[in-house]
Image (spheres, coloured by chain):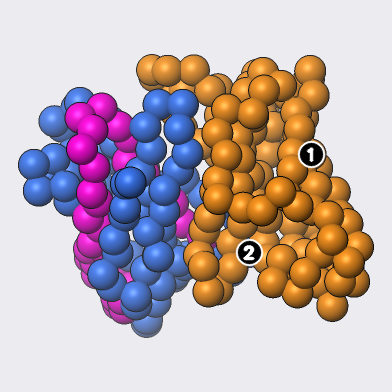
Amino acid sequence: AQTVTQSQPEMSVQEAETVTLSCTYDTSESDYYLFWYKQPPSRQMILVIRQEAYKQQNATENRFSVNFQKAAKSFSLKISDSQLGDAAMYFCAYKRTASKLTFGTGTRLQVTL
Amino acid sequence: KAGVTQTPRYLIKTRGQQVTLSCSPISGHRSVSWYQQTPGQGLQFLFEYFSETQRNKGNFPGRFSGRQFSNSRSEMNVSTLELGDSALYLCASSLGTAGGGGNTIYFGEGSWLTVV
């Protein structure tokens, strides 16, 4: 079974600084998708970024970028120029086609002034 | 384009009762999936429906059931409620087909269920 591990329960970053959230996963498949979701206090799960495993190029979305290391089964999220609105729970998730999302346990990100 | 809509947003039920939650997916999305989120167990997959058929099912007891209608709207039902069923129930939709953006899943705001 696929598993997703987020080893950092909590992280803190100062406003305008850069922070990296870690995620590793375990799978025997070669074709899959990886996601980072943000869950603010409102509890709605918001898609931050996605990565297709067959693409070598790391995905980027404005201030958010990933470091995808397929061989190492690592998928970290880098948030640049952190803003107060970035404070939330961040979940890493794995998915195969026509299959469910498997989530990690989440990392709570605090942004301080 | 409207997002995933879940109703009701908040509800309180008594042990032994049953509850039905509703989810309207993003227009054009044919796959609807349900997840339960609790502090202890995290996010757990309940089931997924695609074109009115259950395509995947998580490891939950038979008290948890769902269905999908021809317009892709979905409902999930929990019978004989237990205190442990108190959770945030998240509905998500996707195109449901392989390739491109078909595998990106978009979530609703969730339905908060409290069982007393």
Given residues A62 and B89, the one toward you in this image is B89
Q: Position of residue A61 (x, y in %)?
A: 33, 41
Residue A62 visible, this angle: no
The N terminus of chain B lies in quadrant: top right
Q: Residue at x 55, y 46 (%)?
A: B58
Above or below A48: residue A18:
below
Q: Is residue A10 left or right of residue B3?
A: left
Q: Quadrant of residue B28?
A: top right
Output the chain of dot 1: B
Above or below B73: residue A100:
below
The hue in which chain B appears in the rendered picture of the protein: orange
Output the chain of dot 2: A
Identify the residue under disc 2: A42
Query: Which of the labelled discs sits on residue B75, or is there none?
Result: 1
Task: Give the residue type that dot 2 points to.
Answer: Ser
Q: What is the tally of numbered marks visible in this picture?
A: 2
The C terminus of chain B lies in quadrant: bottom right
Task: Give the residue type that dot 1 points to.
Answer: Glu
Q: Quadrant of residue B76?
A: top right
Q: Position of residue B81 (x, y in %)?
A: 81, 64
Element class at badge 1: strand
For mark 1, does the 10 Å Cα neighbourhood hold few (<14), some (14 to 19), or many (20 or more) residues? many
- Magenta span contains residue A46: no
Residue B53 visible, this angle: yes
Q: Which residues are magenta?
A: A11-39
Q: Is residue A7 left or right of residue B63?
A: left
Q: Residue at x 83, y 55 (%)?
A: B79
The hue in which chain A appears in the rendered picture of the protein: blue
Q: Residue at x 25, y 27 (%)?
A: A31
Q: CA distance from mark 1 to mark 2?
A: 22 Å
Q: Which numbered disc, 1 or 2, marks the residue closer to the eye?
A: 1
